[in-house]
Image (tube, rainbow, N blue to C red):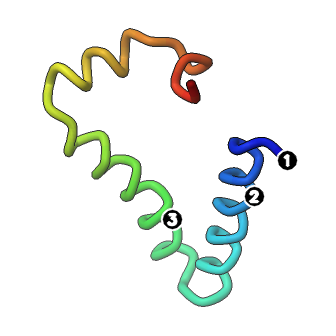
Amino acid sequence: MSKRAKIAVGGVAVGLFLLIWLPWWAAFLIVVGVPAAAYLALDPGQRRRLRRISRKELGG
């Protein structure tokens, strides 16, 4: 199993766990809020570079 597949399976597992233990709106806020907070934590140069590269290049 590739590294990306393991990450995807882990993300799905965490998402299902959150949906079971939290109200749907709280799980949604976590699923959307964590990546948004990570993006906002980048400095402007890193954000520009992230927007410039394609999705295929993100994984390495």
- Residue type (three-letter) at the residue carrying disc 3: Phe
Can you tell which mark lies on residue 29?
none
Residue 16 found in image quarter: bottom right
Please identify the quarter of the rendering in which residue 57 is found: top right
- Do the CB atoms of the residues marked 2 and 1 lie less than 8 Å apart? yes
Out of 17 and 9, give the one closest to the viewer: 9
Residue 28: image tag: 3
Residue that mark 2 sits on? 9
Badge 3, how many Cα within 10 Å: few under 14, some, many 20+?
A: some
Q: Quadrant of the C terminus?
A: top right
Amino acid type at mark 1: Met
Side of 60 relative to 43 (left or right): right
Residue in front for this viewpoint, 14 or 59: 59
Neighbour tally class for label 1: few under 14, some 14-19, many 20 plus, Cα within 10 Å:
few
Question: How many numbered badges does the structure rendering display?
Answer: 3
Residue type, mark 2 in image: Val
- Residue at left offset 85%, top offset 47%: 1
Q: SS of the residue at dot 2?
A: helix
Going by the picture, which residue comes out furthest to the right? 1
Judged from the image, the secondary structure of the residue bearing numbered disc 1 is loop
Q: Earlier in the sequence, mark 2 or mark 1?
A: 1
Residue 35 screen position, x and y as percent: 40, 49
Label 2 to label 1, Cα distance in Å?
Answer: 10 Å
Q: Which residue is mark 1?
A: 1
